[in-house]
Amino acid sequence: METGEMKDATSLRFWELVKLAQEVWDKTYSTEEIEPYLLDILRLAREHPHERNNLANCFIKLLKEPRATVEIFQFCMRELRWLEIKRAVEEQMWQNAGNLRFLDAMQQILDVYSEEWLDADIYGYYRDKPP
């Protein structure tokens, strides 16, 4: 597989996993039910470090979509802590400064970059992990 094909395959897999997570999230409000799907997205990013730029661009594109799921960003960026995603979130906050609901959602994403994330216990993956 050529590099371009690998990027396309990784991007396609990312969007497939995001779609699955969003479909489950549309049917439930339980983080326990969505967590396996979030873990799949995180695994994809961890298992393809050579695709970081490509995957970061996918996350940034997702961030700009109206159906962006805050939980995807929280779950994945808590471990990955990609600064380009943090900067993209901050940029979105600046561009949407008048939208308090949006700002709250973006702040929830930024919170995962702090040393202590108060909402970590809503996910078994982070609840069972030492800080």
Image (cartoon, rainbow, N blue to C red):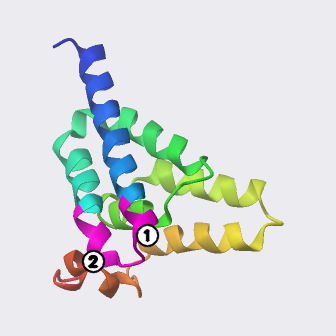
Please, what is the three-letter code of the amino acid marked with disc 1?
Tyr
Q: CA distance from mark 2 to mark 1?
A: 22 Å
Is 100 on the left or on the right of 45, as rendered? right
Q: Nearer the viewer, residue 122 or 3?
A: 122
Please, what is the three-letter code of the amino acid marked with disc 2?
Glu
Judged by depth in the image, the label closer to the viewer, 2 or 1, is 2
Question: What is the x, y in percent for residue 58?
Answer: 44, 39
Is 21 on the left or on the right of 49, as rendered? right
Q: Which residue is mark 1?
A: 113
Question: What is the x, y in percent for residue 28?
Answer: 40, 73
Quadrant of the snapshot with the C terminus: bottom left
Q: Earlier in the sequence, mark 2 or mark 1?
A: 2
Task: Give the answer, above or below, for where 11 lies relative to 94.
Answer: above
Specify the farthest residue to the right: 98
> In percent of the image, x 33 and y 51: which residue is there?
20
Instruction: For mark 1, give the secondary structure.
Output: helix
> In percent of the image, x 42 and y 56: which residue is there?
22
Q: Which residue is mark 2?
A: 32
